[in-house]
Amino acid sequence: MSADIAVESSEIRARGLGRVFKIRLSQTRSLKETILRRELPRTRELWALRDVDLDIHRGETFGIVGRNGSGKSTLLKLIAGIFSPSTGTLEVEGRVGSLIEIGAGFHPEFTGVENVYLNAAIYGLKRTYVDEHLDDIIDFAELEQFKDVPVRTYSSGMYMRLGFSVAMHIQPDILLLDEVLAVGDEAFQQKCFGRLGDFKRAGGTIVFVSHDPSAVERLCDRALMLDGGNVLEEGPASEVVSAYHRRLVSSPAEAAVHRDGERAGRCRVHEVRAVAGDGAARDRFVEGEPMALEVWLYAEEEIEDASVTVGIRDADGRPVGSQTLDDVRLAAGRLERLRLNFPGLPMREGRFFVDVGVTTADRDAELALAERALELSVFGSDAGGSGPIRLGGTWELPHVDGTGDG
Amino acid sequence: MAVDTASEGGFPTLSWLPRYGELLRTLVRRELRMRFKGSALGLFWSLIYPLAMIGVYTLVFSVLWRVTGNIPHYPLFVLSGLAVWGFFQAGIQLGTTSLVSNGELIKKVWFPRELVPASAVLAQTVTIGVMLAILIPIALIVEPSNARTVPLVIPIVAALICLVLGLAWILSVANVFFRDVEHLLAVVFLPWFFLTPVLYGLEQFSAASGHRWLILLMRYGNPVTPYVESVRAVVLQHTVPGAPLLVYVFVVGPVVALLGLWVMQRYEDRLAIEL
């Protein structure tokens, strides 16, 4: 298997790397708006990454940890070349295989085989090379029966298997891994880790991003911790991970999340996390999976009866649903955790954003607002059903004795 | 990995072409397959519309209205115009929307973005190719002396492809930033069609001699017109177009293509964020 993994050279080197995004406060823009509204566009600059120095050596497995919005994905996308740096320099030597997002580089209307060709061509490979390796790629992805079906009918697991298989067969020198592996089934994950081990032994470089610190500790030699776009720690993976753990539990004031619309007032939304059934924080879920939203609030002074609203919007900003809890008492100077439990996720496949707002009991004054405090990806399950929500009802079959009537 | 090359230089470059030639071919193939997928008659459908329109125009202008008396072989005259116009319009319209409709691909992986509009445009060359393949043999039968000038159609069409590529690059980027561009185009194309000498020839108007400047404006102010007239001249009228027309054809096309490439490479980096 490791025969077709040939590593020539690879190295990633960044100096003073930064990336700024202009965040537009109103989502859509049309020609009319631009022409008619002459006042300054309502945009804000957001430094997703600032002044990062980084050296990743050939053959190294390098982890990046940090919370949502800390700049992990931006760094990975810069290395993948999806966008270029705003400041500083970045040199990436060698062919980069990326498994950053599920289905990246796939066209939904294309069959599995067509997408293999498309994806390989994006990596700059010749058609003849793919001709030779097509069977291996499909085999590894375990998609023999589905290779001629449009990939839009694939489950997220199938998407991931195909993406992983292509990425491993394009002979990358550097492999970028986001948390996509988490959606595969156990057996395939083992297969992936086996393959990653081969890749590593053959001298390949891996950059691995996760907010599951234990995975980083297990896999990586060295690691980097990002917060608010800045590098906080860099060093041996175990040290960085323990620093990350310390940080997660400590110092609320320092680790504050600064987000759109947040008030510097008496109260703020410190963090919003989604927690899976096993207690681990994640932002990728499968339809119907048990999940809890944890909202960490911090109040400077005591608040007697706040109302806390958690709202979920879809990728286009349309509200999906919200829920309010009244009479919340927040003690002064302490982090308070609220938890909203979902026995089964009600959303269907898609991307979602979680907003958290805190108001006074009469809803007159807004005490804190964190828009898009959390981004969630929900993947389809094989359970079937249609429509905007997952009904999630349970069936009961008719009884023979007829007592169910009435 | 070309992380830092594309958006920095001031000059447009084609340096990506050798490495991504395969991707361009794949995208064009994909574009063609999508278009003809699931239809038994395939390519036939892309011909039936122009052929039906030629029938209607001939019936109205030639048979009933009799305003085309001095144009020989009127159906072929219209066909030559429609071949150029059809490619121009379809190439630009599909090219313009291509970046937005392939947003998923662009947001998630890096490759030279100019490939996406280019593949949409290049896939449209099939239509003009087939229409010329019908037109040229007939033109040679009705007027064998056309054979002397017909080979010139190749460089003229190549220059036309450059023009459409350039416009598609510019407009597709504009459409990412302002989604109304595609709607605007849909509105503009119909009047534009009637201002282009597809159904008529510019010399044909009786008022032409009195409004020389108007004719000049219609000929050189409308970028498609020189291409329509040049293709028609070499295929149907066994004449080589005059020097001004030829200079226009072979300068404007490549210049617009370079300009388009420059726009594309200038904004390349912002596409993934805007989409």
Image: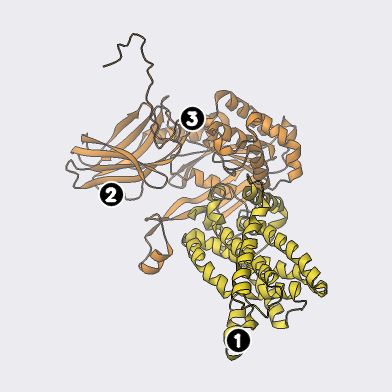
Q: Residues at marks 2 and 1, common chain?
A: no
Residue A391: image x %, image y %? 38, 30
Chain assignment, label 3: A
Residue A133: image x %, image y %? 73, 36
Q: Residue furthest bottom?
A: B210
* Camera-side residue of A248 and B210: B210
Tell me: A7 left or right of B116.
right
- Image quarter where the C terminus of chain A lies is top left
Q: Secondary structure at mark 2?
A: loop
Residue under circle 1?
B206
Q: Residues at marks 3 and 2, common chain?
A: yes
Foreground disc of the pair 3, 2: 3
Foreground disc of the pair 2, 1: 1
Query: Which chain did the renderer colour orange?
Result: A
Dot 3: within a 10 Å radius of its alpha carbon, few (fewer than 14), some, or many (20 or more) residues? Answer: some
Identify residue type, mark 3: Ser
Residue under circle 3?
A381
From mark 2 to mark 1, how far is it between C-alphas? 76 Å
Identify residue type, mark 1: Ser
Foreground disc of the pair 3, 1: 1
Query: Which chain did the renderer colour yellow?
Result: B
Residue found 55% across the figure and 29% down from its top = A184
Residue A88 vertical position relative to residue B78 in the rendered view, above or below: above
Residue B246: image x %, image y %? 71, 78
Q: Earlier in the sequence, mark 3 or mark 2?
A: 2
Identify residue type, mark 2: Ala
Residue found 28% across the figure and 49% down from its top = A263
